[in-house]
Amino acid sequence: MLLTMGPVDPQFHQRFQDALGRGDMFALFEHTREAIELFPDDPETRYLQALAMARLGDPNAAMRLYKRNRVEEIGTEDAVALKGRLLKDLAVRTSGKEQIELFRQSSQAYRLANQLSDGYFSGINAATTSFLAGDRDEARDLAIAIGKRPDVAHPQDYFAAASAAEAKLICGDMEAATALYAEARRRPDASAGMIASTARQVALIADRLSVSEDQCQALLDSIRPTPVIHFCGHMFRSGWSEEAKIASEIKAILDESDVMIAYGSPACGADILIAEAMIARGGEVHLVLPFIEEDFVKTSVIVGGSEWVARYERIRDAAASITFATEMRWVNDDEQFAYCAKLVMGLAQLRAGVMQAHTFQLAVWDGEPAKEIAGTAAHCAEWRGLGGEVRVISVPTSRPPLDSAAVTGTQKHPSWKLCSILFADFAGFSRLDEDRLSQFLEVVMGRIASVLDRHSEDVLSRNSWGDAIYVVIISPSKAAQIALEIQSELDPDALQSIGLPAEGGMRISLHHGPIFEHFDAVQGARTYYGTEVTVAARIEPRVPVGAIYTTQPFAALIESDRNNYQFEYVGRMDLAKNYGERILYRLGTEGA
């Protein structure tokens, strides 16, 4: 690969700015990862890669990138201030004396950044972190000084306006702070990413204020990021007399809530109307299809009339992203649609979590209860079951009938089910001599077997060959628990105590999707196979020793189940044996 030592290509710079403006830290990280391979010494790329990881919510990983990318050496206010931000984020994850010390270190870093350029950004953050460390008088003095600056007292951009509000907040003037945050949020240069970053800061301060619950809520509402929505609704024929009314109500809700980010599946009728309305208002639409596009168009688009096809293609081409829940064909099974719906809900919640944004489901629904596992009523029940808010646009139960989806072929499909897949192997296994191999089989494989035995009710199938492990598990949450327990049992100290190499350890990959079930006559047991099994197997060689990597569907489904797990965005990676690219996450637990 040809490395360029000069500044980054302008095309990359534009991608960086676009991703920052949208608040899409996944995209920003991906762009910087690609750029840094070509321009390893570019200061902007080095800085933004660490910033993206910080905004993705993993300060430990961000600090590793900060050091690896030599960000502090860049010497700008932003570069040094990022160290203050990371120390602040690390402080939030601790408590007691350690937390206070980290907040003070953060304030010192911000003050150093402020000395480099006398910028109000680092100055207000120095005040805030002093406040969070409990040094209230010092924080107040810093905040008053920042608030008196002409560029803050009479702001010309979003960040100056937000800094003016923060200075008032630190000084205890809740009413003025709330009004100024609301004013900053309405500024034309305020982007989703900027607002999300400010909202995180406000939430930190609000936790330490002695104010009424109503005052606190008004403050948080004044700077809340725009919602991320999941959308769904009934399919209906093109030209239905209710279409214009539905479109008008969709627009009203999107306008009222200022929605700019939406996730859904683009079936004919309500789904396409919502996607069209989002695109018309300049928002992001992220589409998820349950299976290959050709079959989706047959089952979910053209059944409402051929006029929908062109409209579908326009929103597909304008979409911010398109994800396929599976690479299967349609097998005339509603489980495929139900899985897709659960996945798209999880993706919306993942994005909202990064932005600390509110989510709600926008449903065009006739109010009839669910009779099947998929469909608008089922999706509403699923979202409500997760504690989510559903905003309903009511439609008549009587609608012009859809055409029948064309069924291709009469071949019987093999039995399949949605499962989680775990692959693991031991780095350094091939270098073990016979004595160590005996220890490995007894201790390492024995401990793994004990973990699987503890979860026998959740394990559908298990197999091993040499150091490799292949396990099929009933759900993502159970698979995550098993993977974390395996790594806990095989920590480096335990491995070295039995004479295994220090660089050895397990690498684990996790995936979730539809897999096929078959009776293996040789083993005399059930076995599972399919494309999704191969995907999990191809991820595992890319996993660092001691880590657990998961696919995006796995992470999204964990998120939709509201479990106590944390995902660090790794990026889009090439899989082993030329098996394409996948977005991967590193699995951990909250607070770990």
Image (tube, rainbow, N blue to C red):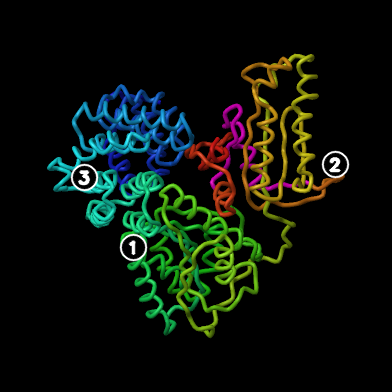
Element type where label 1 sits in the image: loop
Circle 2: residue type: Gln
Query: Which quadrant, please, contains the N terminus?
Result: top left
* Nearer-N-terminus badge (3/2): 3
Residue position for label 3: 160
Mark 2 vs mark 1: in front? 1
**Pick the front one: 98 or 158:** 98
In the figure, is residue 178 to the left or right of 97? left
> Whole-Å distance between the Cαs marked 2 and 1?
58 Å
Q: Nearer the viewer, residue 23 or 6?
A: 23
- Relative height, residue 288 to residue 9 (above, below): below
Say if mark 2 contacts mark 1, CB within 8 Å: no
Q: Across the whole image, how many numbered discs are drawn on residues?
A: 3
Residue 80 occupies which quadrant of the picture?
top left
Would you say residue 314 sits in the magenta stretch?
Answer: no
Mark nearer the N terminus (1 vs 3)? 3
Residue 464 percent across, percent down from the top left = 76, 34
Report the magenta residues as a range. Answer: 527-552
Which of the two discs, 2 and 1, labels the residue nearer the N terminus?
1
Task: Examine the rendered structure and indicate whether residue 25 appears above or below residue 64.
Answer: below
Report whether residue 269 is seen. no
Q: What is the number of the mark on residue 451?
A: none
Query: Which amino acid type corresponds to the residue marked 1 in the rendered image?
Result: Asp
Real-space Cα distance between discs 3 and 2?
68 Å
Q: Which residue is mark 1?
A: 258
